[in-house]
Image (cartoon, coloured by chain):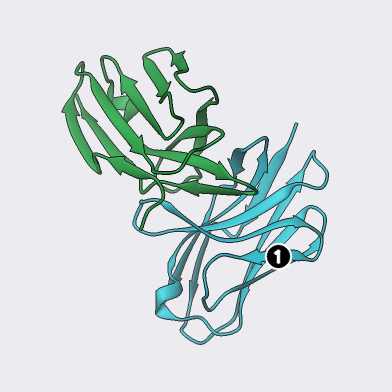
Chain colours: A green, B cyan
């Protein structure tokens, strides 16, 4: 059983469309992170959200942390082919960082 | 600045052969170090983590072991590889709950 459930598992959209990826858990996290990974490389940190209800923006990406600190979402506006990749959410439990199963995003031009 | 090195990038090993993957970190001291395995481009499964020299925590019973002989060195090993050990192995260090990854090792057991 995944501690962090991500949805959807796979998303294929046209360039210019908007999308939202969700990360849900029954556990409370002190913080959640979002990573992006390209094939054959390690994940790269995009953002960390810490405060319940927090919203962070990174250019066309908007990250939100749920009020109860159990869930998070990633919204991409006007997706571009360069956004293609695997998006992973992760949460810290003590010294461990646990990951969701990921969302594979494909943006077609 | 901190950097993390992981090698080799790719490895093809026969079933029953030993394994040693090495990870080193530069630019930080006493880091928390992690080994993850990733199957088919999906989520990361935590295998081992270490908070200091000689301290290893195992997350999943398996055919692998880990060691931390030096502060900034983390090694993943196996005495006899199985086909199911194939996958993408990632080393990471963590600071303030944020993880920084190496480039990964693609292991294929044949």
Q: Is residue B102 left or right of residue A82?
A: right
Q: Residue at x 36, y 49 (%)?
A: A101
Q: Quadrant of residue A10 in the image?
A: top left
Quadrant containing the C terminus of chain A in the rendered view: top left
- The residue carrying pointer 1 sits among few (fewer than 14), some (14 to 19) or many (20 or more) residues within 10 Å by Cα, namely some
Quadrant containing the N terminus of chain A in the rendered view: bottom left
Residue lying at the far bottom of the rendered structure: B16
Q: How many marks?
A: 1
Q: Residue at x 51, y 76 (%)?
A: B62
Q: Quadrant of residue A63 in the image?
A: top left
Q: Residue at x 51, y 87 (%)?
A: B16
* Residue closer to the observer: A54 or B54: A54
Q: Is residue B49 left or right of residue B42?
A: right
Q: Residue at x 25, y 44 (%)?
A: A9
The residue indicated by pointer 1 is B56
What x and y, as percent, mark residue B34? 63, 54
What x and y, as percent, mark residue B108? 43, 70
Give above or below for A80 relative to B25.
Answer: above
What x and y, as percent, mark residue A23? 35, 36
Q: Quadrant of residue B57 in the image?
A: bottom right
Q: Is residue A64 left or right of residue B65?
A: left
* Residue closer to the observer: B86 or A68: A68
Give above or below for B6 relative to A91.
Answer: below
SS under mark 1: strand
What x and y, as percent, mark residue B21? 63, 65
**Chain under callout 1:** B
């Amino acid at each position: 059983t995944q501690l962090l459930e991500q949805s959807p598992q796979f998303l294929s959209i046209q360039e210019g469309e908007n999308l939202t990826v969700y990360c849900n858990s029954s556990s409370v996290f002190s913080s959640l992170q979002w990573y992006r990974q390209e094939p054959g490389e390690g994940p790269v940190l995009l953002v960390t959200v810490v405060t319940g209800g927090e919203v962070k923006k990174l250019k066309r990406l908007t990250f939100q942390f749920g009020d109860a600190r159990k869930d998070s979402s990633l919204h991409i506006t006007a997706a571009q082919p360069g956004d293609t990749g695997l998006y992973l959410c992760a949460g810290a439990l003590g010294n461990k960082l646990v990951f969701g199963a990921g969302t594979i995003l494909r943006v077609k031009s | 600045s901190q950097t993390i090195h992981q090698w080799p990038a790719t490895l093809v090993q026969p079933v029953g052969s030993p394994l040693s993957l090495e990870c080193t970190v530069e630019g930080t001291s006493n880091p928390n170090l992690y080994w993850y395995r990733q199957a088919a481009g999906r989520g990361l499964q935590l295998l081992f983590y270490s908070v200091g020299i000689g301290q290893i925590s195992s997350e999943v019973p398996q055919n692998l072991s880990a060691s931390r002989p030096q502060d900034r060195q983390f090694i993943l090993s196996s005495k006899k590889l199985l086909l199911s050990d194939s996958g993408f192995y990632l080393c990471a260090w963590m600071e303030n709950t944020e993880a920084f990854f190496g480039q990964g090792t693609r292991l294929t057991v044949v």
